[in-house]
Image (tube, rainbow, N blue to C red):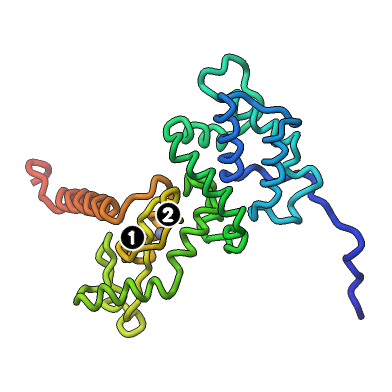
Amino acid sequence: MTMPKQAGFQVKAVKNPDWARDEIILACQLVMDNGWKGLDAQDAKVVELSGLLQLLPIHAEADRNEKFRNPNGVARKTFDIATRYPEYRGKPTNGGALDVAVLMDFLSRPDEMTRVARLIRQGIAVGELQSLAPTDDEVFDDYSAPEGRLLMRRHQAHERNGSLRKKKIASVTQRGGQLACEACGFDFEEVYGDRGAGYIECHHVVPLHEAGEGRTKLSDLALICANCHRMIHRRAPWPTPEELRASIERNHAADRRAAEAIARPRRGACD
Ligand SMILES: [Zn+2]
Ligand SMILES: [Zn+2]
């Protein structure tokens, strides 16, 4: 028995997916360059951005309908952002929490966010970002990387680059160093024996908006255990391994104090 052919007609999504952080970053940059005012659908910059957004490898083809990020939708988004600008004196149009979050990022770090927008555009223009697989962290939310999902994918591709990791590990062991997590000290071999020997993850400590130009230096990679790596990437801003170490130590100290308080006999209570 053969299955009926699906070809010949296409089911289109009823509603287009919500805008991802990357898309809002590109729209927000347009609004900033336009003096924090919205742009019309006929504007050449809006038409250009509409074409670019349709190229971004973020939303599956099956989730899009024929109006996906068309100039009208892009223009509407620029007004959603512009009417959230703190000095705007009217009622905000629709827009969501993520629009506001990205707008605030642009207001507090305009140079950095402009650079992020440029890197996303460049990465798409040269085809680099289209070839990267989605990362595990994307399933969480749009808040784990202020730079968006696409630069995050590039970050994780760097970190998973096997030859880079091997070189980093070799550079540490050759110096007689221990393959232990720089944040919590976890040593895979110590805990898992042979199975864990030689294993550790690498975290690229250079911020996403600064990485990408030039080659990754071994000194930009930190040795980090799987748990600490997850915790670093979980929410922005990402702590450095040293900052994570300090927070682990603070939590341990608090734990110890609590345990001591319980263990200490309370005077005058019931003796
Ligand atoms: Zn660790
Ligand atoms: Zn990392």
Quarter of the N terminus within the rendering: bottom right
x, y (%) of residue 23?
61, 43
According to the picture, the residue beneath numbered tag 1 turns out to be 220
SS of the residue under disc 2? loop
Q: Is residue 165 above or below residue 21?
A: below
x, y (%) of residue 27?
61, 37
Q: How many marks?
A: 2
* Residue most extreme to the top: 89
Labels 1 and 2 touching (C-beta < 8 A) = yes
Q: Is residue 154 above or below residue 188?
A: above
Within 10 Å of the Cα at label 2, are there few (<14), some (14-19), or many (20+) other Cα atoms? Answer: some
Please report whichever mark, 1 or 2, sits nearer to the chain's N-terminal start.
Answer: 2
x, y (%) of residue 62?
76, 56
According to the picture, the residue beneath numbered tag 2 turns out to be 211
Q: Quadrant of residue 169?
A: bottom left
Q: Report the amino acid beneath label 1.
A: Asp
x, y (%) of residue 101?
51, 35
Within 10 Å of the Cα at label 1, are there few (<14), some (14-19), or many (20+) other Cα atoms? Answer: few
Out of 190 and 78, give the one closest to the viewer: 78
